[in-house]
Image (cartoon, rainbow, N blue to C red):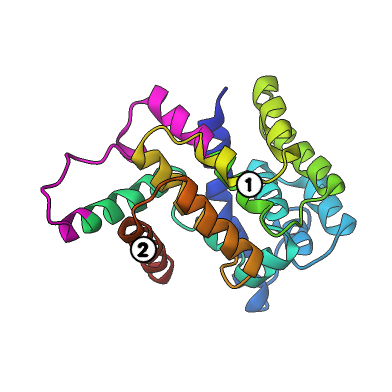
Amino acid sequence: MNTRGLLDQLLKSGQEMIKNKAGQSSGKGTAAGGLGGLGGLLAGGGGAGLGGLLSGAGGGALAAGAMGLLLGNKKARSFGGKALTYGGLAALGVIAYKAYGNWQAQQAQAPQGEPQTLDRLPAPQAELHSQAILKALVAAAKADGHVDARERQLIEGEIGKLTNDVELQRWLEAELNKPLDPADVARAATTPEMAAEMYIASVLMVDEEHFMERAYLEELARQLKLDPALKTELEAQVRVELTAS
């Protein structure tokens, strides 16, 4: 499966979401049929916004539409896809790497070698990390219970427009239909670095002020067996990156 390519498109699409939100806030607006459709979707429009998006959008806007559906209208309106201002998939590895470095510096023991984060891995290993991160992203999207059967169908349709990888589509459909289970998500992490990246992706997706979502994050961190100090550092590094962006 080419999970890496799909996930990279989804992450980069957050930039388009933010640009569109900024344009609307400044009164500049957007072109019809392009990000204007996305604006309708994110502004809370149901079928009309989605229809506008699908009627003439390019791949980037379609990816943003899929990400908007995963976020949910309420989340997308509140922080406009904060998740993904950094320029794509490798940025998650960069955040994890910085957090690891800070965490190691705080420990009494010597550093255990350079962290093998996503931005420093060869393609086959990066693909494994990508699949685990996408699994975490989908689960985090379900943490507030907003993804119902209709929305799952819409998300699957959007993803189908981004990739013709049938195996990947079936895998994603299965993930969307699974009951929310932090333990199942955590089992996808086979290295500490992968666990850190999955947690970062989850933090970026959820609204931490929402009780259900915060509870999900706490349980996910426990299931991932994150050191409490590393968990704190990962969250702090996300806040730094969001402030910088």
Where is residue 161 drawn, in percent x and y? 73, 34
Left or right side of 31 for 196: left
Observer-nearest of 53 and 99:
99
The quarter of the picture where the N terminus appears is top right
Q: Which residue is mark 2?
A: 232
Tag 1 secondary structure = helix
Residue 172 percent across, percent down from the top left: 68, 33
The C terminus - image quarter:
bottom left
Counting residues from the start of the chain, the first of labels 2 and 1 encountered is 1
Residue 127 painted magenta: yes
Q: Quadrant of residue 185?
A: top right
Circle 1 residue:
139
| Element under disc 2 | helix
Quadrant of residue 125 in the image?
Answer: top left
Estimate how packed mark 1 is, as few (under 14), some (14 to 19) or many (20 or more) residues with alpha carbons within 10 Å: many
- At label 2, counting other C-alpha atoms closer than 10 Å, the crowd grade (few under 14, some 14-19, many 20 or more) is few
Q: Is residue 67 above or below residue 156?
A: below
User: On the rendered structure, is 108 left or right of 122?
Assistant: left
Relative vertical location of residue 135 with respect to residue 94 in this rendering, above or below: above
> From which residue to which does the magenta span run?
104-133
Q: Residue at x 40, y 39 (%)?
A: 194
The three-letter code of the residue at mark 1 reads: Ala
Q: Residue at x 53, y 54 (%)?
A: 219
Q: Is residue 132 left or right of residue 239?
A: right
Amino acid carrying mark 2 in the image: Thr
